[in-house]
Image: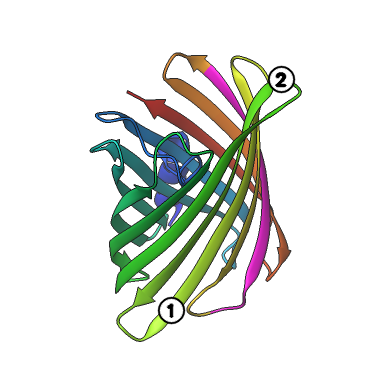
Amino acid sequence: MMRCSILALMLLPWMVAMVEAGAWPRDKGQVFMVLSGQIEGRDDSGLYQQHGALYAEYGATEHLTLGLDLGGDTLRMTKAIAFMRWQLGPPDRPLKFAVELGVGQVEEENALRPGLSLGRGFVLWDRAGWLTLDGRAALLGGRDVALESDLTLGLSTSQNTKVILQIQTGRPEAGDPYTRIAPSFVYQTRPGQQIELGIITSVSGGGDTGLKIGLWRTF
């Protein structure tokens, strides 16, 4: 157990969480990855809980984005989904709309994960921003359903920085419905690479406040 915890802390900056996904397709041939991890309060054994994931997107065509969504803790992988997202309507339409379909496993059960995304860009105080709403339903083993949604507000505060506020809600297959707030700060260290620092705190449904660190890459 101790070795797993030390290894998770060493790998923390290279684990992944979903951030800037949603209704905007990736440019054709472009790859986007988010590598991040999260540490929460101590578990029953007294060790801090560590969670990580791998999120990646690839622009297959002007409208089609392919992706991979992996997640887990120090003991096991709890999510492994391959997905494709199709943007509907003309690319220059202000209101973006996309549908998504993923297949894989969630909590060691076969899962089919359909989803919908809405997004719109805006300008505030001469700064570019975006607002997205992403909703997903994981159909587990053909019997149970887990629901989750993210409302994300982002704003570029300078050429190299942006701030993000995300409200996460969900209803797991087992457990209570939850609501979490996740603000973060993103800084561009060089072209195509950004670092994200943030926190995740529970509003309802239980859970400890967590710290998040991540690396965004575009190439």
Would residue 126 appear left or right of 42 to someone viewing this image?
right
Secondary structure, magenta segment, majority class: strand
Res 77 seen here: no
The amino acid type found where label 1 is placed reads Val
Give the structural element (helix, strand or loop) at label 2: loop
Provide residue 92's location: percent of width, then percent of height: 45, 34
- Do the residues bearing badges 2 and 1 touch, measured as CB atoms within 8 Å? no
Residue occupying image coordinates x 45% and y 43%: 21
Residue occupying image coordinates x 42% and y 41%: 15
Per the rendering, the mark at residue 181 is: none
Res 125 seen here: yes
- The quadrant holding residue 108 is bottom left
Residue occupying image coordinates x 47% and y 46%: 18
The reply to whether the magenta stretch includes residue 183 is yes
* Disc 2/disc 1 C-alpha distance (Å): 42 Å
Per the rendering, the mark at residue 126 is: 2
Instruction: Work out which quarter of the rendered image holds the N terminus and state it.
Output: bottom left
Residue occupying image coordinates x 30% and y 43%: 65
Vertical relation: 210 (above or below) 143: above
Residue to which mark 1 is pinned:
145
Magenta region = 175-188
